[in-house]
Image: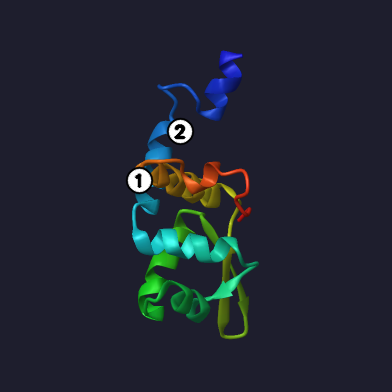
């Protein structure tokens, strides 16, 4: 069983730990978190649509998307001159959701995500 866990990176001495830290570092930016939130509710979006959703300039968003693409958090599809972005998989979206849930705990009381009548997102 420990061999399975080690191959998945769950041991403290796993080589995946450093890679996980790099993922957290990539997500340690409010604009990138907002980009992931915008993309989690869409099949794919253009740079201009993402920029509008996160209230940032297309040039700035494009730079963040390039970093997220290098980290394999987002993927692209080109249609003519336009590039569309989508999340590579559901993991970054889950990390961001869990971080937001953790942030809700810091406010005290019962976090919104613990309410039974909470609308799924």
How far apart marks 1 and 2 lie (CA) works out to 32 Å
* Residue that carries the numbered disc 1 in the rendered image: 107
Residue drawn at point x = 37 percent, y = 80 percent: 57
Check the picture and name the quadrant holding the C terminus.
bottom right
Which comes sooner in the sequence, label 1 or label 2? 2
Check the picture and name the quadrant holding the N terminus.
top right
Residue 75 position (above or below residue 72):
below
Residue drawn at point x = 62 percent, y = 67 percent: 42
Residue 87 position (above or below residue 106):
below
**Considering the numbered disc 1 on the image, is that residue within a helix, a strand or a loop?**
loop
Q: Is residue 120 left or right of residue 108?
A: right
Residue drawn at point x = 54 percent, y = 47 percent: 94
Q: Is residue 84 left or right of residue 69?
A: right
* Residue that carries the numbered disc 2 in the rendered image: 16
Residue 11 position (above or below residue 46):
above
Classify mark 1: residues with Cα within 10 Å, few (<14), some (14-19) or many (20+): few
Residue drawn at point x = 38 percent, y = 70 percent: 63
**Considering the numbered disc 2 on the image, is that residue within a helix, a strand or a loop?**
helix
User: Looking at the rendering, which quadrant does residue 31 occupy?
Assistant: bottom left
The residue positioned farthest toward the top in the image shown = 1
């Amino acid at each position: 069983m420990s061999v399975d866990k080690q191959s998945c990176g769950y041991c403290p001495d796993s080589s995946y730990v450093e890679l996980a830290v790099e993922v957290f570092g990539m997500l340690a930016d409010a604009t990138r978190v907002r980009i992931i939130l915008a993309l989690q509710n869409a099949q794919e979006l253009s740079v201009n649509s993402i920029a509008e959703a996160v209230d940032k300039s297309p040039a700035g968003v494009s730079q963040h998307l390039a970093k997220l693409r290098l980290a394999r958090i987002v993927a692209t599809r080109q249609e003519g001159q336009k590039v569309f972005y989508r999340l590579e998989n559901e993991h970054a979206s889950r990390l961001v959701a869990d971080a937001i849930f953790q942030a809700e705990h810091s406010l005290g009381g019962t976090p919104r995500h613990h309410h039974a009548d909470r609308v799924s997102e």
